[in-house]
Image (spheres, rainbow, N blue to C red):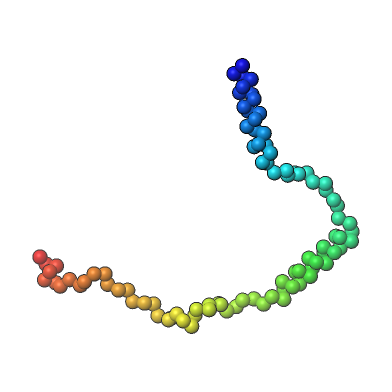
Amino acid sequence: MKILRAAAMLVLLTGPAFAQTPNINLMPDVKSKTPEEIERDQRLEKAYRESLRKIPDANAVNDPWGGVRSTEAPAAKPHGKARSSAASQR
């Protein structure tokens, strides 16, 4: 009787979990391309490669904040107060 109850609980609990899984078709119907589609894809790929060649190379560094920053590095600030030599000898 305990086994029957355990089996019933297992079935009742796995039903909602199974319903939540997405329905994914791992083997869709494979369609081959027609010669016209292959030719069209080749023309599109060629046009894409040609458009990439037309893009100029970025030779200069694009720094929009370059005019705002100073060219010198800031000086390091000393931490705490400077000790006198008499205080350090004690």
Quarter residue 21 falls in? top right
Outermost residue on the bottom side: it is 67
Residue at 64% from the left image edge and 37% from the top image edge: 17
Quarter residue 34 falls in? bottom right
| Residue 34 higher or lower than 8, as above or below | below
Residue at 73% from the left image edge and 43% from the top image edge: 23
Residue at 78% from the left image edge and 65% from the top image edge: 45
Q: Quadrant of the C terminus?
A: bottom left
Outermost residue on the top side: it is 1
Task: Return the x and y of residue 1 as percentages of the image width and height.
Answer: 61, 16
Quarter residue 73 falls in? bottom left
| Residue 39 higher or lower than 19, as above or below | below
* Image position of 72 (left or right of 23): left
Task: Return the x and y of residue 50 as percentages of the image width and height.
Answer: 76, 72
* Image position of 20 (left or right of 62): right
* Image position of 75 (left or right of 86): right
- The residue lying toward the viewer, choosing from 47 and 8, is 8
* Image position of 85 (left or right of 78): left
- The residue lying toward the viewer, choosing from 18 and 68, is 18
| Residue 84 higher or lower than 17, as above or below | below
Task: Return the x and y of residue 75 as percentages of the image width and height.
Answer: 33, 76
Task: Return the x and y of residue 79 as percentages of the image width and height.
Answer: 26, 69
Residue at 53% from the left image edge and 78% from the top image edge: 64
Q: Report the label total.
A: 0
